[in-house]
Image (cartoon, grey):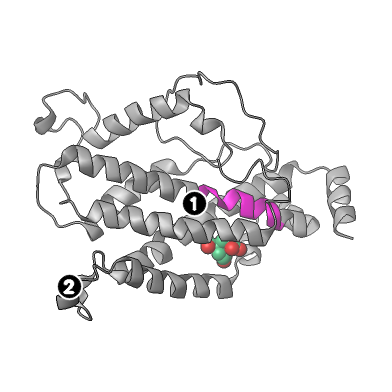
C-alpha cells in the first residue's frame, strides 16, 4: 500500500520501475529466509498424513495461506490495487475503505494460481535441500512471504502496462482490437531494461547472500542461496509472467478504450 497516496505523480514509468527494483530486494531476502529450512515436501501435498486431517483436502501451505489471507482481508489488504489474494472466499474488511488514487482500469486479471504452481514445482525445490527438518510452520510462513512478494511484483505489470498505454494509446488500441498479443508483447518489451535488471540481480544475490564468515569468504560455501537460481527465477518466471499480465491488461484496456478517452490521453501528451 506504499505509493498510492503520494501527492506528486507516483505513476511515471521511472517511479513504477523503482518499485520493481525495491521488490527485487524483498524477493531475494524472502528466498534467503525460506532457504534456511529444508524443503519439507509434505507441506505441499494435499491431505498429507503429517497433519492428521486438520488441513482437509488442502495442503498445509494452502490451509495456512487461506487462514492468513482471511486476517489480511479483514484489515483491507486486498482493497489495495497492488495486492492480490491467492485464496477465496475471503471476509469483508473490518476497517472503512481507503480512497486510493485511481490509475488502473478495472480488470479481473489474477495469475496467482500460476505463481503458486510454479513456486511449488520449480522455485522452492531449487532453493531448499530436499529433506524433512520438521520446521513445517516456519517453512510455510516463509513460503507465504515469497509468494506474496512474487505476486505483488508480477501484478505490478498492470501499472507498468497502464503507463505504457498512456504513452501510446492509439497504437496499443489498434493492436488490442486485432487481438494481436505478439505485437503487444514486442511493443512493451524493453530488452535493455531486462538485461540491466538481470545483471543487477546477479550482483544483489551475490552481496545479499554473503554470510561474511571470513573462513568461507571467496568460496561458494558462503552464499546462502545460489546466485544462478535467483537470476533464472527472474529470467524464466518473473519477467515472463509480468509480461503476460501486461499483455492481458493491454488487450482489455485497448479493447475498452473509447475514442474520447484516446483523444484526451493524446492531448495530455502534447
Ligand atoms: O520496465 C518495464 O518496462 C517492464 O515492462 C517490466 C519488465 C520486467 O518484468 O522487469 C518487463 C518487460 C520489459 O521488457 C522490461 C522489464
Residue extending farthest to the bottom is: 218
Rendered position, 62 above or below 231: above
Q: Does the magenta-highlighted stretch encompass residue 154?
A: yes
Q: Is residue 225 above or below residue 106?
A: below
Q: Quadrant of residue 164?
A: bottom right
Please provide the residue range marked out in magenta.
153-164
Left or right: residue 111 versus residue 257 is left
* Magenta stretch: helix, strand or loop mostly: helix
Q: Quadrant of residue 106?
A: top right
Image mark for residue 200: none
In front: 161, or 3? 3
* Residue pictured at 18% horizontal, 51% vertical: 37
Secondary structure beneath dot 1 equals helix
Q: Nearer the viewer, residue 181 or 170?
A: 170
Q: Position of residue 205 (x, y in %)?
A: 35, 68
Q: How many marks?
A: 2
Q: CA distance from mark 1 to mark 2?
A: 31 Å
- Residue sitting at 23 percent across and 26 percent down? 57
Tell me whether circle 1 and circle 2 mark residues in contact (CB < 8 Å). no
Residue 221: which numbered mark, if any? 2
**Badge 2 density bin: few <14, some 14–19, many ≥20, Cα 10 Å:** some
Disc with the residue nearer the chain's start (1 vs 2): 1
**In what quadrant of the picture does the C terminus appear?**
bottom right
What residue is at 21 percent from the left and 33 percent from the top? 46
Nearer to us in this view, 66 or 16:
16
Residue 157 lies left or right of residue 202; in this view the side is right
Q: Which mark is residue 154?
A: 1
Amino acid at each position: 500500500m506504499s505509493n498510492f497516496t503520494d501527492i506528486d505523480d507516483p505513476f511515471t514509468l521511472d517511479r513504477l520501475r523503482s518499485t520493481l527494483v525495491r521488490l527485487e530486494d524483498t524477493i531475494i531476502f524472502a528466498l534467503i529466509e525460506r532457504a534456511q529450512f529444508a524443503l519439507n515436501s509434505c507441506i505441499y501435498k494435499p491431505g498429507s498424513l503429517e497433519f492428521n486431517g486438520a488441513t482437509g483436502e488442502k495442503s498445509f501451505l494452502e490451509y495456512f495461506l487461506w487462514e492468513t489471507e482471511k486476517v489480511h482481508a479483514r484489515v483491507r489488504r486486498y482493497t489495495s490495487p497492488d495486492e492480490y489474494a491467492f485464496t477465496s472466499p475471503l471476509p469483508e474488511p473490518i476497517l472503512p475503505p481507503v480512497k486510493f488514487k485511481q490509475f488502473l482500469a478495472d480488470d479481473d486479471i489474477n495469475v496467482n494460481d500460476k505463481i503458486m504452481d510454479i513456486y511449488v514445482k520449480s522455485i522452492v525445490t531449487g532453493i531448499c535441500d530436499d529433506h524433512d527438518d520438521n520446521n513445517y510452520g516456519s517453512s510455510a510462513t516463509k513460503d507465504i512471504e515469497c509468494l506474496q512478494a512474487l505476486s505483488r511484483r508480477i501484478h505490478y505489470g498492470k501499472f507498468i502496462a497502464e503507463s505504457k498505454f498512456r504513452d501510446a494509446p492509439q497504437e496499443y488500441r489498434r493492436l488490442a482490437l486485432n487481438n494481436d498479443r505478439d505485437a503487444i508483447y514486442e511493443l512493451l518489451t524493453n530488452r535493455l531494461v531486462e538485461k540491466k535488471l538481470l545483471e543487477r540481480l546477479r550482483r544483489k544475490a551475490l552481496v545479499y547472500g554473503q554470510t561474511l564468515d571470513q573462513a568461507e569468504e571467496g568460496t561458494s560455501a558462503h552464499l546462502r542461496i545460489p546466485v544462478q537460481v535467483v537470476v533464472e527465477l527472474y529470467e524464466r518466471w518473473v519477467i515472463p509472467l509480468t509480461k503476460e499480465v501486461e499483455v492481458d491488461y493491454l488487450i482489455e484496456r485497448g479493447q475498452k478504450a473509447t475514442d474520447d478517452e484516446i483523444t484526451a490521453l493524446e492531448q495530455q501528451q502534447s
